[in-house]
Image (cartoon, helix red, strand yellow):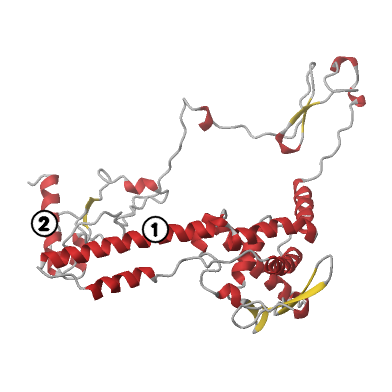
Amino acid sequence: MKTFKECVDDSVNRLVEVRKRTHDLATKRKEHVCSEAVCAPRNERFYLAHGFIALPIVCDGVFLCRFGSIHVCTPATCTRYMENTQGVCPISGVSYGQVYSTAYNKEDTRTWYQKPQTNTVEESDARRIVRVKRSRTVLMQSGSLFADPLSASSEESAPREEEPPLEEEKKKKIGRARTRTRQQLEPKIKYVIEQLLFSHARTEYNDEVTQKHAEAHKKQQERYLLNCKKHGQFPNLIDLHTISNYYNNLPLPMLNIEMDNIMLDHYINVISQVWAIVAKYADDNSTKVSVEAVSLGTLYTLRQGLAYNGIQLIPKDPFMCQRGVLPIINDVVRFGFTKKTVTCGEKLIDAAYNRAMAKNVSKDEIMINFSIMQQQNNEADYMIPLNSAGKKVYY
């Protein structure tokens, strides 16, 4: 009579043979976690049901995946089924029944049963414990805090002021954040615009990419010269010139934009208008509405605009559409921001406009028109038109 190990070996050989015959066994091993979707582990019963092998079955609990990994799934050898309460092995799909487990440890007090707190008031001769909100315990005696409880009656206890609920405090905080004036918003909006469009980080990024292009250019030339030497040929100056032209004409990630106060004021005005709409129509309980997120989301939304049912609510900005004006989202970390903040801002703007349109708000109230936008300052009003190429035309 065969031992269990011999049965497992015979079953593995049988599975290898049938997988090779059906061209379902990879020639190279692959590091992976076995599952039905990744490598399709199979046992003899599967191939018997499909007519690839005949009876008898040597060992029903041996599973072989297409990358050659073996799993012996029996109650004595498999422990994977204990990873879930259903008692199902994630590799073979064999069910061993529901598993009950506990993290109790008599040496660890964190796993001990905790008696639930009740609202009953327990009094003693020394003090009275009063349970209040936020799981705080306040010692309250008659007259004043920490007074002698035996010297006064319980009817003379000092009244406790009711604290405002957390939800009310949260709503007040959100309300204060969304009702800020433009003078309060402008410094943060200005900082975001200056960091993305006019900061020294743009030059540093270009210098870094230029250095990488120079190193790649040098390596390509050395590779070409070595190849010519290997074949006993003289280098061709035209080939060398072509290599140099390729690397010298590679585009830089950032355009060189000079500081422009009129452009700065223009985008401050655009972001301020979008902020007013987001603050008014965003979810009342959302704490993610921040000036930084809305500012970044607005600048990146201007690249493609925002339309609702064919109505262009935020027009497409030709200047922002140019390559190298804004960094790609994955590179905003170079400018002191995060990709998550940009995507959060774009989602806030989209959600606010959807809520506004769902409430049948007039499109003129939420539409941004900056093709010729009036901007006010302390001296006079002036206009900032942009032509189709994104260039500013001043009056």
Q: Where is residue 308 drawn, in percent x and y?
A: 65, 79
Task: Assess disc 1: are there few (<14), some (14-19) or many (≥20) residues with their C-alpha within 10 Å of its C-alpha.
Answer: few
| Residue on which the image places disc 1 | 211
Q: Is residue 227 above or below residue 90?
A: below
Q: Nearer the viewer, residue 265 or 61?
A: 265
Query: Is residue 56 visible from the viewing direction of this image?
Result: no
Query: How many other residues sit within 10 Å of disc 2, few (<14), some (14-19) or many (≥20)?
Result: few
| 203 sits to left or right of 47 | right
Most foreground residue, 340 or 225: 225
The residue lying at 79 percent from left, 16 percent from top is 126
* 248 is higher (above) or lower (below) than 44: below
Q: Residue at x 84, y 23 (%)?
A: 145
- Which of the 4 image quarters holds residue 389? bottom right
Which residue is label 2 attached to? Answer: 13
Task: Please say whether residue 137 is visible from this viewpoint.
Answer: yes
Q: Which of the pair 240/188 is nearer the observer?
A: 240
Q: Which percent across, then down, holds residue 376?
A: 81, 69
Work out how far the residue at label 1 is from the one at label 2, CA to CA, in angstroms. 57 Å
Amino acid type for the residue under numbered disc 1: Gln
Number of on-image labels: 2
Q: Position of residue 4 (x, y in %)?
A: 14, 45
* Residue found at the far right of this picture: 156
Q: Mark 1 falls on what kind of element?
A: helix
